[in-house]
RNA sequence: GGGGAGAUACUCAAGCGGCCAACGAGGACAGACUGUAAAUCUGUUGGUGUACACCUUCACAGGUUCGAAUCCUGUUCUCCCCA
């Protein structure tokens, strides 16, 4: 069943702005649109997920989505929203990053059928594009005045911190603009989408298309996701939340969504869930009844984790969460066999200790440090003073000793600092 | 090339010879309250030791001094203005 793309985005709160005529163009039949991804890391993060979802909806509406991997643009660095000049990456790293991102995108988009998704890399058409050719054929079409009027440029030149901006970054919008032109010309793409911070870059593209060929192209942007506390979405203390399980374990990924604030969760569900409007509204209503149960967060976490990491990983994440946070006491964990424990705690912090050392008993502070859970004795002492340390879910004092008898399955030790920080110590190796 | 300003802990930002492991703010972590939420209140936020203590830190390398983040010299880097 095909959906109406723009309508779909609207009710989901995913539409920030669109050029006049965009909706009409889409209603005429199958269209092609692209979104660019920056290969600055070897994994996409949840920050990129909004764009991925946009492409999914686009495909679901019967259109053909393109994902552009910015092999060339990644070498330059987008100045939008950045107050500082970016570090440039080498070609090798970029290549590697592109490959990884490509594999991740394949989880979301269908590469079958008449509107199958396509992945392109702008490095392919830039690598042989000489500088002189570029400034003649492209640079000539756009005035510096026009480029200077973009917010991304203005902020850098006259912004409060006077950071300044290199010519390289100044050129960025032209490069991205040319991408659009190229895809318009050679692939028949009429629409570029992106975060609202990309508006300036996208319109440079439509402008180029108009000036070079008198052609028409469109722009559509999604709002930047805000968190209710004003911090950046997709980042936690531990850094970015990535889609790659090697960087962010499925457990942490699941926890990230589960921990969404009430104020944010409904918005997230609308954006990151493929559920229908009715389903989402009923979940939201249920959540209203009893926010403490957090049905909203659970639905969100389950759907997103399953899509990204698969059913099995999701089940393990839920399992681990229940043991760690659920009411079930430590007995539940004793009942598990070693393999299950290892699987469940995959992604929770882990360390090692020699079981020999515990036969005589070891002071808790020492256990914390030796196992690698806490970095220094001072910190361990502080944590103990704060009464924040638990062993096997049991609060312990500074003078307590850990002995062989405390081991679960005669092997594991579950350390905990505060409510959310867990650490599994394995005494065999 | 000429002139000016600056570099302090995760970030911003005081300090300008001893009272400085370094004010303050944000962040982070923890405790209480809760729902693994938000808000609020409280505590912690270089290392070693139970503690009065000691050790290593204020871009880098030297120097002056009983004593330096603070003064001097050199080096590196950043920003601004003029050419």
Image: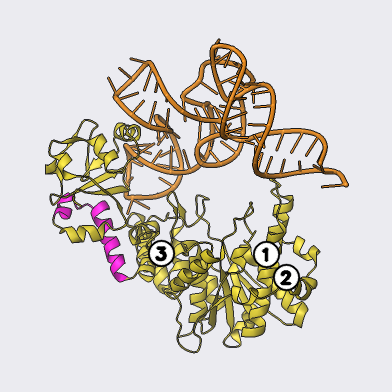
Chain colours: A yellow, B orange
Q: Residues within 10 Å of mark 2 (few under 14, many from 20)?
A: few
Q: Earlier in the sequence, mark 3 or mark 2?
A: 2
Rendered position, A204 above or below A232: below
Q: Between residue A223 and residue A284, name the one nearer to us.
A: A223
Residue beneath disc 2: A131
Question: Which residue is located at x 36 percent, y 68 percent?
Answer: A309
- In front: mark 2 or mark 1? 2
Horizontal placement of A361 versus A138: left or right? Answer: left
Which chain does the residue under circle 3 lie in?
Answer: A
Say which residue appears at 61% left-offset and 84% top-offset. Answer: A187
Q: Secondary structure at mark 1?
A: helix
Q: Nearer the viewer, residue A23 or A183?
A: A183
Query: Where residue A258 sits: x, y (%)?
Result: 37, 58
| Labels 3 and 2 positioned on one and the same chain | yes
Label 3: few (<14), some (14–19) or many (≥20) C-alpha neighbours in 10 Å: some
Residues in magenta, as a range: A311-334
């Amino acid at each position: 069943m095909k959906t109406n793309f723009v309508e779909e985005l609207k009710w989901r709160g995913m539409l920030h702005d669109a050029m006049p005529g965009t909706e009409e163009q889409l209603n005429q039949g199958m269209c092609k649109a692209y979104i660019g991804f920056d290969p600055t890391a070897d994994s996409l993060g949840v920050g990129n997920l909004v764009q991925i979802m946009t492409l999914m909806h686009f495909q679901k509406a019967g259109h053909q989505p393109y994902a552009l991997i910015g092999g060339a643009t990644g070498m330059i660095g987008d100045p939008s929203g950045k107050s500082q000049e970016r570090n440039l990456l080498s070609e090798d790293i970029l290549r590697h990053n592109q490959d990884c991102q490509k594999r991740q995108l394949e989880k979301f988009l269908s590469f079958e059928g008449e509107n199958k998704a396509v992945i392109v890399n702008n490095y392919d058409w830039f690598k042989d594009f000489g500088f002189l050719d570029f400034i003649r054929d492209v640079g000539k079409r756009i005035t510096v005045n026009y480029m200077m009027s973009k917010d991304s440029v203005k902020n850098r030149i006259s912004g409060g911190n006077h950071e300044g901006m290199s010519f390289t970054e100044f050129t960025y919008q032209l490069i991205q603009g040319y991408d659009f032109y190229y895809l318009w010309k050679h692939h028949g793409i009429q629409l570029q989408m992106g975060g609202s911070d990309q508006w300036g870059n996208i319109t440079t593209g439509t402008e180029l298309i108009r000036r070079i060929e008198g052609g028409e192209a469109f722009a559509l942007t999604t709002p930047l996701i805000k968190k209710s506390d004003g911090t950046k979405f997709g980042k936690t203390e531990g850094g970015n939340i990535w889609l790659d399980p090697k960087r962010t374990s499925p457990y942490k990924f699941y926890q990230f969504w589960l921990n969404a604030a009430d104020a944010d969760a409904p918005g997230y569900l609308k954006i990151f869930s493929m559920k229908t409007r009715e389903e989402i509204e009923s979940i939201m209503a249920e959540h209203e009844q009893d926010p403490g149960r957090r049905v909203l967060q659970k639905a969100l976490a389950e759907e997103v984790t399953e899509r990204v990491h698969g059913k099995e990983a999701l089940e393990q994440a839920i399992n681990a969460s229940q043991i760690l946070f659920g009411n079930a006491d430590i007995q539940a964990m004793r009942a598990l066999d070693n393999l299950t424990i290892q699987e469940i705690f995959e992604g929770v912090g882990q360390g090692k200790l020699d079981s020999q050392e515990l036969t005589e008993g070891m002071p808790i502070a020492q256990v914390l440090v030796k196992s690698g859970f806490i970095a220094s004795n001072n910190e361990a002492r502080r944590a103990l003073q704060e009464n924040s340390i638990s062993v096997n879910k049991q609060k312990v004092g500074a003078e307590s000793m850990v002995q062989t008898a405390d081991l679960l399955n005669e092997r594991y030790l579950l350390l905990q600092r505060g409510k959310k920080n867990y650490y599994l110590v394995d005494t065999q190796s």
